[in-house]
């Protein structure tokens, strides 16, 4: 009888471990795997299931008159459906049809960093900015959710192709399952793009966290290209031309305090 019980236990354990493997593999939105059980007793020390409620503007795409960012890439049909960092599923066609202030502008990478050592990247994923600055998941509507075990306090870094990154000045914690942050009202590492409104600096075509001569060179090499997706197209209107160079010129010499 004991022998049968032992065999049954082994069989059940095997089934559970297979099921667990399937569940982990189904987390396709995330890199890495959450190894903690959902009912872990240490939940007060960690955050492992929360959403991000972030607002952010990109200088090059921001329109001071409408207080919205432009969605020319989407309108021209050249916003890549695939995330440039391969961290998220593709954008569904239905999301690309959304118009107005919730229309999609561009991809951003989101890093969660150690609150004690901000050079230490704990987790990364990607999302999309809507014209009004809301950060959403690849489907264009849903908030970004993080299903990964992390410390309860952390830094958040936003990275965009063509702009300098921004990081939280102080570590934050999720409250009631939501980590909320409005980067447009914070000036740390950002530019005041309108009175009281802050955004990421445009001009880092090479994406190495500074705006220098090599970024101008990247612009020169692509100057004249049209209907393209390019990190030298700082205003993201699909063309690389003199309007983009103006952003580089205004911000030449600015570098980010965020470590790569
Ligand atoms: Ca650069
Ligand atoms: Ca442009």
Image (spheres, rainbow, N blue to C red):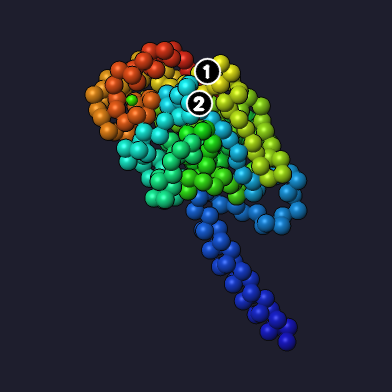
Q: Position of residue 206 (x, y in %)?
A: 37, 25
In the rendered view, does 246 fall on the left or right side of 221?
Answer: right
In the rendered view, does 197 fall on the left or right side of 245?
Answer: right
Q: Position of residue 257 (x, y in %)?
A: 54, 21
Q: Which disc is residue 194 wearing? A: 1
At 52% across and 58% down in the image, what residue appears? 26
Q: Position of residue 244 (x, y in %)?
A: 34, 20
Q: Which disc is residue 218 wearing? A: none
Picture quadrant of ligand 2:
top left
* In front: label 2 or label 1: 2
- Helix, strand or loop at disc 1? strand
At 35% across and 38% down in the image, what residue appears? 75
In the rendered view, does 226 fall on the left or right side of 174?
Answer: left
Along the line of sight, the residue nearer the viewer: 55 or 69: 69
Give residue 234's quadrant in the image: top left
Distance of label 2 from label 1 (alpha carbons): 9 Å
Q: Which disc is residue 67 wearing? A: 2
Residue at the outermost bottom position: 1
* Ligand 2 within 8 Å, label 2 CB: no
Along the line of sight, the residue nearer the viewer: 196 or 201: 196
Using the rendered image of the protein, determine whether residue 121 is visible from the camera's viewpoint. Answer: no
Labels 2 and 1 touching (C-beta < 8 A): yes
Using the rendered image of the protein, determine whether residue 29 is visible from the camera's viewpoint. Answer: yes
Q: Position of residue 235 (x, y in %)?
A: 38, 25
Q: Is residue 238 above or below residue 201?
A: below
In the rendered view, does 35 fall on the left or right side of 127?
Answer: right
Along the line of sight, the residue nearer the viewer: 73 or 219: 73
């Amino acid at each position: 009888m004991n022998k049968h019980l032992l065999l049954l236990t082994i069989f059940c354990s095997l089934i559970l471990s297979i099921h667990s493997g399937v569940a982990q593999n189904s987390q396709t939105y995330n890199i890495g795997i959450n190894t903690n059980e959902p009912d872990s007793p240490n939940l007060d020390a960690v955050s492992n299931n929360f959403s991000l409620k972030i607002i952010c503007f990109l200088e090059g795409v921001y329109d001071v008159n409408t207080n919205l960012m432009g969605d020319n890439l989407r309108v021209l049909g050249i916003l890549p459906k695939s995330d440039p960092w391969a961290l998220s599923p593709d954008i569904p066609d239905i999301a690309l049809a959304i118009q107005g202030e919730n229309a999609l502008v561009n991809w951003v990478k989101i890093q969660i960093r150690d609150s004690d050592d901000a050079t230490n990247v704990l987790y990364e994923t990607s999302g999309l900015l809507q014209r009004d600055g809301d950060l959403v998941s690849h489907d264009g509507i849903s908030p970004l959710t993080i299903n990964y075990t992390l410390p309860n306090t952390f830094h958040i870094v936003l990275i965009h192709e063509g702009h300098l990154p921004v990081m939280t000045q102080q570590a934050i914690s999720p409250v009631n399952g939501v980590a909320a942050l409005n980067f447009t009202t914070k000036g740390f590492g950002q530019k005041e793009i309108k009175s009281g409104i802050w955004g990421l600096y445009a001009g880092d075509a090479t994406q190495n966290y500074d705006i220098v001569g090599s970024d101008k060179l990247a612009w020169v090499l692509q100057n004249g290209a049209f209907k393209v997706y390019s990190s030298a197209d700082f205003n993201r209107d699909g063309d690389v031309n003199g309007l983009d160079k103006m952003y580089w010129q205004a911000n030449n010499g600015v570098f980010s305090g965020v470590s790569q």
